[in-house]
Image (cartoon, coloured by chain):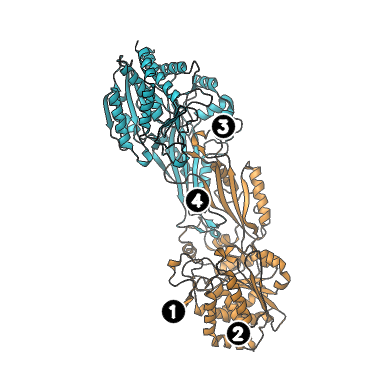
Chain colours: A orange, B cyan
Amino acid sequence: MSLREALRVAAEREDANVADLQAFLRMPSVAAQNLGMQACAEFLAEHFRAIGCDHVRLVPTAGFPVVCAEVRGESDRSVLVYGHYDVQPPEPLEAWPHPPWSAHLENGRIYARGAVDDKGNFYCAVKAVEAYLQAGRRPPVTVKFWIEGEEEVGSPNLSQFARDHYDWLKCDGMILQDGGEASDGRTEFNLGMKGLLYLELSVRKNPRDLHSGKAPVVENAAWRLIWALASMKGPDDRVLVDGFYDNISPVTEAEMACIRQNAIPDQVLVDEFGGAPLKQGLTGPELFKTLYFEPTMTVCGFDSGYNGPGQKTVLPATAKAKMDIRLVPGQDPQDLLAKVKRHLVAHGFADIAVKTLGGAGLPAGRTALEAPVAQALLQAVTEEWHGRKPIIKPSVEGSGPGSIFSDILQIPWALTRFGPKEALMHAPGEYTEVAGYLRGIRTIIKFLQYFQDWE
Amino acid sequence: MSLREALRVAAEREDANVADLQAFLRMPSVAAQNLGMQACAEFLAEHFRAIGCDHVRLVPTAGFPVVCAEVRGESDRSVLVYGHYDVQPPEPLEAWPHPPWSAHLENGRIYARGAVDDKGNFYCAVKAVEAYLQAGRRPPVTVKFWIEGEEEVGSPNLSQFARDHYDWLKCDGMILQDGGEASDGRTEFNLGMKGLLYLELSVRKNPRDLHSGKAPVVENAAWRLIWALASMKGPDDRVLVDGFYDNISPVTEAEMACIRQNAIPDQVLVDEFGGAPLKQGLTGPELFKTLYFEPTMTVCGFDSGYNGPGQKTVLPATAKAKMDIRLVPGQDPQDLLAKVKRHLVAHGFADIAVKTLGGAGLPAGRTALEAPVAQALLQAVTEEWHGRKPIIKPSVEGSGPGSIFSDILQIPWALTRFGPKEALMHAPGEYTEVAGYLRGIRTIIKFLQYFQDWE
């Protein structure tokens, strides 16, 4: 049986698998700084070729290339493995215990930028496939690797790529590995991501800042933007833009059951938030339902007039605010943009200009726990965590390309996490644990087998 | 007759008067930079002594010294001359056609920081008194010079000085000269200044900025401050703080008559404002009534979250706004501060902290055109402008220490302007015109005579 053989190979090759990950982690690949991107993509492609993948190629995009590879499986079933080879900038360098490109191994930890996000996570699938191939077998299902280089800069070309390569990407299921375990040592299972629309609202009332003595007779850009924003959301946090809550998919009983089953103590969340107090009255399952399913409108920045030390009696000519809207299923970013613009005009704020930053926005994406891909992965994860089920989140509070998978590709998907609990993602000192990485490889080896026949 | 003799002396000494002003302008005296302050004060005191003043002294304050001097007059009547020897910082130096401390004379203009604001203005009174003394006469009324060194930094010690030196300062009238002519070549006559209360409103909701995905369950400092501010003033510009408009002294018929008489075309105001459009519907006397008599609440600055380029999905932990309130007669700054604080608590914004910047605030101050000091100065000004009456403003839109004169000292006062129309006060290239300076000297010579007997 190929599963047992693949697991045996993985056990024999633990040191090699660690060394291979270290070699990969030593390739800098910071998309935001255009640092090492082409070299890292080529390194990865070469590794895919070396382990025996077919159709390995760097596909150019408007940004950094996507690395694609494929291994035909023993069955007709296919799984798409999404990951990203780009990483966050490592600065500040002096805050690292070991240099970010050293992949230094010490006490079972590998220190490197990208150790968890995402190189050390998606490599589990690479090594799982390799285990089957090294055992002289094909993997139980066809595996396609879709490894992009722009995740840390918002995946601006991913939806276009999905449309352009729909036929190749289309599989029976899709898996993603990213991030680390929850604080109680369980891993997570994410089945949904919110969407995102990022807006900049700005207004200019006068050619230049004026002495504030003129205030009785000329308009003030700061006040205009304050009133416009206050018209869009009230102190009860309810968004007042007409139609904002239209067509939102209701939270299903299955999703609520998930939340009830997985609820962690409120205090764990408060600790995760660095001690930020929760809104009054929010607790238990209701807290998590709100966190995962409530769409939001957030002022991320507001700048107007004089903000230096002391007093300056100035009447600001301009004001600007940044705002993100996090969407839930049923909401469409372009529809919301139109509604925001209509709201401003209807409420007397036609002077407020609205533009989008970071593209046209992304809808929310959600997949179903019932899909074979999710069930097979859940089985593998539960086994490798010794019967401890993951925290199953029907959605997360963050935004991501879930809708590209759910809506454009229309593939059921599941995301889990093989990193350690305090992985310091996006922070100095990012590391992964060797034991967790090897467990991730075993998990994917099992998943590939279970998925073959899962009904 | 001493008036004729003083005018003759002034005519003979025109070159000397210009040279004396140039010498004074060459003494840097930037209060904000503590540049040359003591030396300039001593230079001025020495000049008072040189022209024959008595009781010349530098009076220490918590900040820079006040220069006081006195000349006994021929009558019992007395006038207080207020001015300031400190000037604005001259930067950017490269934007000056001639260096700011050169007092360069060219084509009838003297270029210097302080040429108009205020050295070249209050020196008219110094030279007027000197003209009487040089003619071998005492001036018709006793003149006391009260020349402070902190006007450009908000006169933080002036009200204390007025209380401490009440007996010496107490005169039958008071004059101030500052600034330049209106754009139509008339000078101005100002009989009131608004008060000022400067606030900083701030709020912290969380220990640190959070990923904006947390928005459904934690509070956002930017939104809190936006809502708090929107509760304080609505889009119709009406201040909603309970009691804000209480006890405001009504605009008198005499004041409205002044405004109607002096109204300039709206477009002149728009031009003065650098093209800033006027609030809809404001025109004619109503425009100026609003400008001079309406109290205001102005957001001068608002800062929260991320305001750099591009998008950052951040939930701001803190937000801060600067706000000035310009008071009209009847309003008390400490009373308004208490009302703002009460409003915030009553409207659910007890989390917004309020502090004052620049001290306890200043009420508005207004004086009456009927006072002999104003009528005598009006007569002198009208003569020197060849029968063209000044624009008489019952108040100005700016704030100033008028209440110190009106309320603490309880002296009727009048402010006029001897500088040219585009004097570039506070800007690079500040200059005064020799002709205007000499006319200012003649004006004060006449005023001192007319004030002696004006009923």
The tally of labels here is 4
Give SS at disc 1.
loop
First reached walking from the N terminus: tag 3 or tag 4: 3
Q: Quadrant of the C terminus of chain A?
A: bottom right
Work out whether residue B55 or residue B52 is closer to the camera in this orientation and state it. Answer: B52
Q: CA distance from mark 2 to mark 3?
A: 78 Å
Same chain, labels 2 and 3:
no
Which is more foreground, mark 2 or mark 3? 3
Same chain, labels 3 and 1:
no
Q: What residue does disc 2 label?
A: A131
Q: What residue does disc 1 label?
A: A107
Does any portion of residue A262 appear in the rendered image? yes
Q: Residues within 10 Å of mark 3 (few under 14, many from 20)?
A: few
Q: What residue does disc 4 label?
A: B304
Which is more foreground, mark 3 or mark 4? 3
Which is more foreground, mark 3 or mark 1? 3
Answer whether labels 4 and 1 touch (C-beta < 8 Å): no
Q: Residues within 10 Å of mark 1 (few under 14, many from 20)?
A: few
Give SS at disc 3.
helix
Give the left or right position of residue A48, taking residue B54 as reference.
Answer: right
Q: Residues within 10 Å of mark 4 (few under 14, many from 20)?
A: many
Same chain, labels 3 and 4:
yes
Give SS at disc 4.
strand
Q: What residue does disc 3 label?
A: B271
